[in-house]
Amino acid sequence: MNDATRTALEAAAFRRLLHHLMQDRPDVQNIDLMNLAGFCRNCLSRWYQEAASQQGIALDKDAAREIVYGMPYADWVAQHQTGADAAKKATFEVAFKQNVTDRGKASDG
């Protein structure tokens, strides 16, 4: 497989992941993603922003989040985000430390 084909397939898979998180499963909470998988939608948006920066493209946090969430972040939170109990929050603190903070990429989960 050549590089262009691999890149096209990776891009298609990423677009499908975004569609899945935006359209198919907006009910899945970021805290659950982070606790189970070590990343969440905010991580994806940060990675997108970092990739843009590596290409010399200025993309702020809000614009990157809108790409990943399919709407402004505040709108997504208002429409889809639910509360988390103390156990989920405690698990999140560990997952965030292991997967985000310890890697030198602090974020707001």
Image: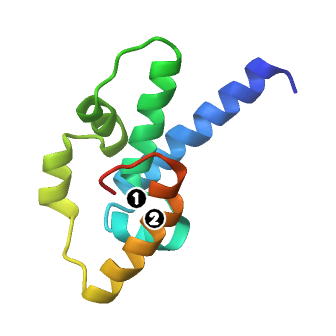
Tell which of 79 and 92 is nearer to you: 92
Q: Residue at x 32, y 60 (%)?
A: 26
Rendered image: mark on residue 97: 2
What x and y, as percent, mark residue 49?
41, 30
What x and y, as percent, mark residue 108?
29, 53
Query: With respect to residue 34, does 50 lie above or below?
Result: above
Q: Classify mark 1: residues with Cα within 10 Å, few (<14), some (14-19) or many (20+).
A: few
Contact check, label 1 and label 2, Cβ < 8 Å: no
What x and y, as percent, mark residue 85?
25, 85
- Amino acid on which disc 1 is placed: Asp
Figure quadrant of the C terminus:
bottom left
Query: With respect to residue 86, does 82 lie above or below?
Result: above
Is 32 left, or right, of 78 in this rendering?
Answer: right
Any part of residue 28 in sight: no
Give the colouring mode of the picture.
Answer: rainbow
Tell which of 57 and 69 is nearer to you: 57
Q: Which residue is mark 1?
A: 24
Figure quadrant of the N terminus:
top right
Rendered image: mark on residue 45: none
Q: Residue at x 40, y 58 (%)?
A: 24
Check disc 2 and report its element: helix, strand or loop: helix
Check disc 1 and report its element: helix, strand or loop: helix
Residue 5 lies in quadrant:
top right
What x and y, as percent, mark residue 28?
37, 68
In this view, which residue lies farthest toward the top? 56
Q: Residue at x 29, y 40 (%)?
A: 70
Q: Residue at x 20, y 52 (%)?
A: 76
Any part of residue 35 in sight: yes
- Amino acid on which disc 2 is placed: Lys
In this view, which residue lies farthest toward the right? 1
Tell which of 105 and 82 is nearer to you: 105
Q: Mark 2 or mark 1, which is nearer the start of the sequence?
A: 1
